[in-house]
Image (tube, rainbow, N blue to C red):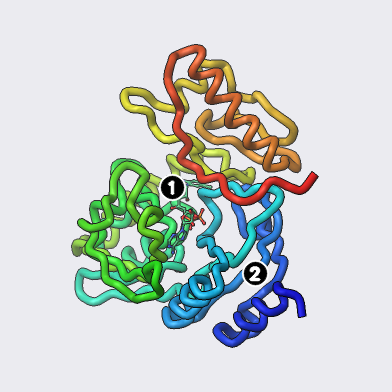
Amino acid sequence: MDNKRKIYNKLLDLVKEENVKMDELLKDHLYTKLGGRADFFITPTSFQEVQNVVKLSNEDNIPFTLLGNGSNLIIKDGGIRGIVINLKHLDDISTDGNTLVAQSGARIINASRYALKKHLSGLEFACGIPGTVGGALYMNAGAYGGEIKDVLDYAYVVDREGNLVKRLASELDLDYRTSNIPDNGDIVVEATFNLKPAKYEEIKEVMDDLTYKRESKQPLEYPSCGSVFKRPPGYFAGKLIQDSDLQGTNIGGAEVSKKHAGFIINKDNATTSDYISLIEHVQKTVKEKFGVDLEREVRIIGEDPEQ
Ligand SMILES: Cc1cc2nc3c(=O)[nH]c(=O)nc-3n(C[C@H](O)[C@H](O)[C@H](O)COP(=O)(O)OP(=O)(O)OC[C@H]3O[C@@H](n4cnc5c(N)ncnc54)[C@H](O)[C@@H]3O)c2cc1C
């Protein structure tokens, strides 16, 4: 039996058969619609299953990668070796008084809508962010003046050893589009938010307004990974790109959006290398023109394709 089949069989001891796939095409799971295959793609249905997979990965030295809703990731065309863990089945959301608890595979948009239904304010900013709760904590997602840091109380994570551990928000080093979750190697499995009671109509009005702003300014009709770059101190990435006359520039099928300069869209069957080349071209042009380094917000992971 080859090694890959052996790992597959071990995973079947931990996760139900319908939740383990081999050679899964990742582009189907990504907002950019780009990316090669994962050796193993698993969708656990309990925290215990996540813990068991981490322990197996440690014992057998198999790397693993978390994939949320794929809205802040570019995966290279050679795909990902080892195990990709996707928590889409861990998506419960509930409230208790002013507290909202969401499992990490739930969409943050759904958590925001659930809060509205329960007349709780604080997650309005997240009503159009297309990631999961886990992905939102990972990068302290935010929009229109709000961010995860403002409302997160604590999270449960599975740590590197496979233990279920509680981490207070203050222990996560949440800052502008960053946290210590990647450095610690934690897998977020659940988050608890502190919200405030408010009138349904007032919360809804804010969400409607933010949705209007987003829909009118962002090229949501094309696959993309949202804003590609972080806001450089003292500047706006979109404005620098616009003032560098880069809107409409394309490499292969990837294009700097004409609607929102901070977005790169997959306009016409782009490859990952088109995307990455265009990102580098934008960084180089802005640096030459304004002397500003644009730091990527989007993560690029995976292997280059074999030649
Ligand atoms: C159209 C569009 C609009 C967007 N608007 C915004 C915006 O307004 N504000 C904003 O902040 N972002 C925005 N984004 C970016 C993106 O939605 C957020 O970064 C989101 O938080 C990513 O979540 P995800 O589940 O898609 O993560 P993924 O893209 O799947 O993963 C991102 C990173 O998080 C890690 N990760 C995912 N889940 C977990 C977990 N459970 N535990 C540990 N690590 C995990 C992954 O390993 C990866 O490194 C936008 C994206 C798009 C496409």
Q: Residues within 10 Å of mark 1 (few under 14, many from 20)?
A: some
Please give the name of the residue rendered at 54% of the width and 35% of the height, measured from the top-left corner: 263
Task: Report, in whole angstroms, how far the alpha carbon at label 1 lies from the one at label 2.
Answer: 36 Å
Q: Nearer the viewer, mark 1 or mark 2?
A: 2
- What amino acid is labelled 1 in the image? Thr
Question: Element type at marker 2?
Answer: strand
Please give the name of the residue rendered at 30% of the width and 49% of the height, measured from the top-left corner: 147
For residue 29, which quarter of the picture? bottom right
Question: Element type at marker 1?
Answer: helix
Q: Is residue 241 above or below residue 198?
A: above
Q: Position of residue 70 (x, y in %)?
A: 55, 55
Q: Residues within 10 Å of mark 2 (few under 14, many from 20)?
A: many
Mark 1 C-beta to ligand 1 under 8 Å: no
Question: Mark 1 or 2 closer to N-term?
Answer: 2
Identify the residue under disc 1: 211
Does the image show residue 121? no
Q: Position of residue 209 (x, y in %)?
A: 37, 45
Location of the C terminus (image quadrant): top right
Identify the residue under disc 2: 40
Q: Is residue 175 above or below residue 236?
A: below
Please give the name of the residue rendered at 30% of the width and 67% of the height, measured from the top-left corner: 155
Does the image show residue 93? yes
